[in-house]
Amino acid sequence: MKKEKLVIIPTYNEKENILDMVHAVMNLEGDFQLLVIDDNSPDGTALIVTKLQNVYPDRLHLLQRSGKLGLGTAYIEGFKYAIEKGYQYIFEMDADFSHNPEDLVKLYNACATDGNDMAIGSRYITGVNVVNWPMGRVLMSFFASKYVQFITGLPIKDTTAGFKCYAIDVLKAMDLDKIKFIGYAFQIEMKFTAWKLGFKIVEVPIIFTDRTKGTSKMSRGIFKEAVLGVLYMKIRSLFKTFKPANQT
């Protein structure tokens, strides 16, 4: 089977969602493949995925890690896996259905058909498209993106979005071992790095719906990392020359 599209989903205690999510991705047109990276979920998430591999033996993949090691490190492992296996388009996505699996097709088309290097599923490109979040969290997320734009100059409205498609050249151009952040600041750092490397980035409007099953992984520590990390990232960039890691 052609290895073109790989969706990466990190999991920790997502047994309520993972079965339905796997089926949803597998049922999309276009032969999407799925890599679940599980951080030793005590609720048995990985066991559910293992059983589903019997149903989708060539399209569903699983990496099991020793513990809760952070969102960013999970994605970095997934990116390295995608590069090694030769995929062309790599997607980041949550397991909790806050991202609609059907929107994966829109992100893919934005890159493969429209010629962009990165497509971001954006909550804020056409207003505020968020469902079931309390107003306080909506405002925090919206103004966090405004803060990131102000500090970094990123021409992106949803700077903290975690629903994305990368063309493989973007990931190959980054020195993935030098991506510093492991929480939600990781999402900002990846966009900032791609932008500084000169890749073409587009925001695709989506509707973000808060999870109805399972528990959110957001914490004060994650938010603090994002706020302070953006300042650190900007200051560090002033003393750094951005060039592709694969440039000879």
Image (tube, helix red, strand yellow):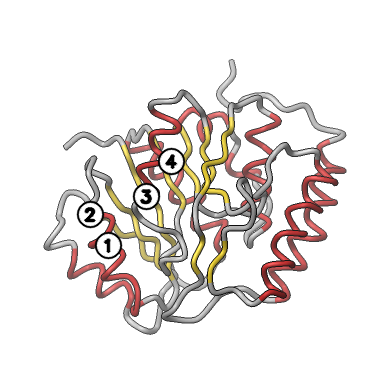
In front: mark 3 or mark 2?
2
What's the residue type where badge 1 is placed? Answer: Val
CA gap, disc 3 to disc 4? 11 Å
Q: Is residue 164 left or right of residue 146?
A: left
Mark nearer the N terminus (3 vs 4): 3
Q: Residue at x 57, y 63 (%)?
A: 130
| Residue labelled with disc 1 | 22
What's the residue type where badge 2 is placed? Answer: Met
| Residue labelled with disc 3 | 7
Question: In which image quadrant can residue 16 be found?
Answer: bottom left
Say how many tags the image has. 4
Looking at the rendered image, the quarter that the N terminus falls into is: top left
CA gap, disc 3 to disc 2? 10 Å
In depth, the one of 224 and 206 nearer the eye is 206
Mark nearer the N terminus (4 vs 2): 2
| Residue labelled with disc 4 | 107
Helix, strand or loop for disc 4? helix
Q: Residue at x 81, y 53 (%)?
A: 147
Mark nearer the N terminus (3 vs 2): 3
Mark nearer the N terminus (1 vs 3): 3
What's the residue type where badge 3 is placed? Answer: Val
| Residue labelled with disc 2 | 26
What's the residue type where badge 4 is placed? Answer: Leu
In front: mark 4 or mark 2?
4
